[in-house]
Amino acid sequence: MSDNVVSTRTQERCVTSYAARTQYKPGVVHPGHIKVKDAIDIHAHAHAGQQDALDLVKKATRAEMKGILFKSIVGNAGKAVRELQQQLDGWAAQEGVAPVALFPGFVCGRNDDPVSAELAEKAIDGGVVALWLPVFNHANTMHIVGSRRELIEHDMNAQGWIGPLSWEKALEHGRYNLDESGELKPEVRDIIRLCVERDVALFFGHPTHKEIFKIAEEAHKSGLKRLVVDHPYSPFLDVSVEQMKALAPLGVLFNFTFDELSPLLGVDPQIMYNTIREVGVEHFTLSSDAGEPLFPDSVEAMRLIRGYMEAFGLTEDELHTVCTANPAKVVGMELDS
């Protein structure tokens, strides 16, 4: 873990946050005017035990959002999202509203699946528009927060949680994108080439800083146009402003999430805003990373993170960049001029 400080003491935070919240006057924020019109959420969850996908996309449609990219959903991602879109389209036609566009994503190396360009390509053939490199079963995650017992013991019936592992133990049980010489593994290079060939987005997952720079350099060299670091201020990534400035010229977008702002991580929204302002609005997106029962649903999470950034100083044009224009590039959506 670096010395990157993204939170502040409550008393100190109050100085900036109280001014922001008392001066932020967006108008009525509950349906039908919910302040997320035209937003595209590029990181939403609806797998087992999380938010209900159909209920969510109906709410997003009512709020006039443009799109949602599902990082996870119950069932096969491509098929599940196609069927969900069909259900939504039928409902929207009856209601006389324009349905939000839905996009499926795919996590490479999920559970016991190998990190494989072949599996990734099958997912793309099924409609996936974005790939994630390993996340919760990456060695970095296991080292920082631990893991579900089933992944450590390789027994899907095992219950409970095992706390942070030593780096050596985490490497034994988790995923890692580099080989023994410190270079990208062939399968990771293959996935990067696949993203270029099929024109899909690549999210970094939960890698170490060394991996982040190796992936970014290879992707830039290969001509990959859509490259995203999720929740850069989460403990899994912990990317500093200076590192963002070094990565931005390689075409990397930084996707700030409600997850970071939530009480579970506690990033100071003033620091998040300052970062966007210092690195450059053109290098950022905002998303929910919502779905868990401890979070609001993705529409409300989008309203909150957008609202925080507006309250602290992003303009309407800048909000369009981080909530609509840049996310549209990630999912490959053409926007009306």
Image: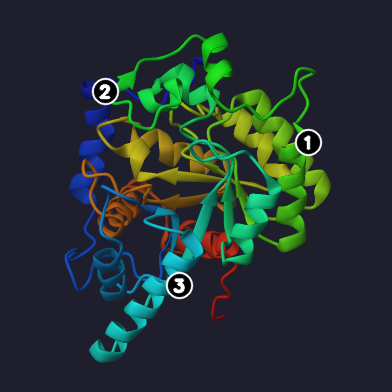
C-alpha span from label 2 to label 1: 47 Å
The amino acid pointed to by label 1 is: Pro
Q: Mark 3 or mark 2: which is in front?
A: 3
How many numbered discs?
A: 3
Q: Quadrant of the C terminus?
A: bottom right
Name which of mark 2 and mark 1 comes first in the sequence: 2
C-alpha span from label 3 to label 2: 47 Å
The amino acid pointed to by label 3 is: Arg
The amino acid pointed to by label 2 is: Glu
Q: Residue at x 58, y 75 (%)?
A: 334
Is 3 situated left or right of 219 in this image?
left
Q: Mark 2 or mark 1: which is in front?
A: 1
Quadrant of res 246:
top right
Is 113 situated left or right of 96 in this image?
right
324 over 145 or under it: above or below = below
Name the residue that disc number 2 marks.
12
* Other-residue count near label 1 (Cα within 10 Å), few / some / many at <14 / 14–19 / ≥20: some
Name the residue that disc number 1 marks.
186
Name the residue that disc number 3 marks.
82
User: Between residues 148 and 64, which one lies in front from this camera angle?
Assistant: 148
* Other-residue count near label 2 (Cα within 10 Å), few / some / many at <14 / 14–19 / ≥20: few
Q: How far from the left and from the top, in percent, is residue 79?
A: 47, 67
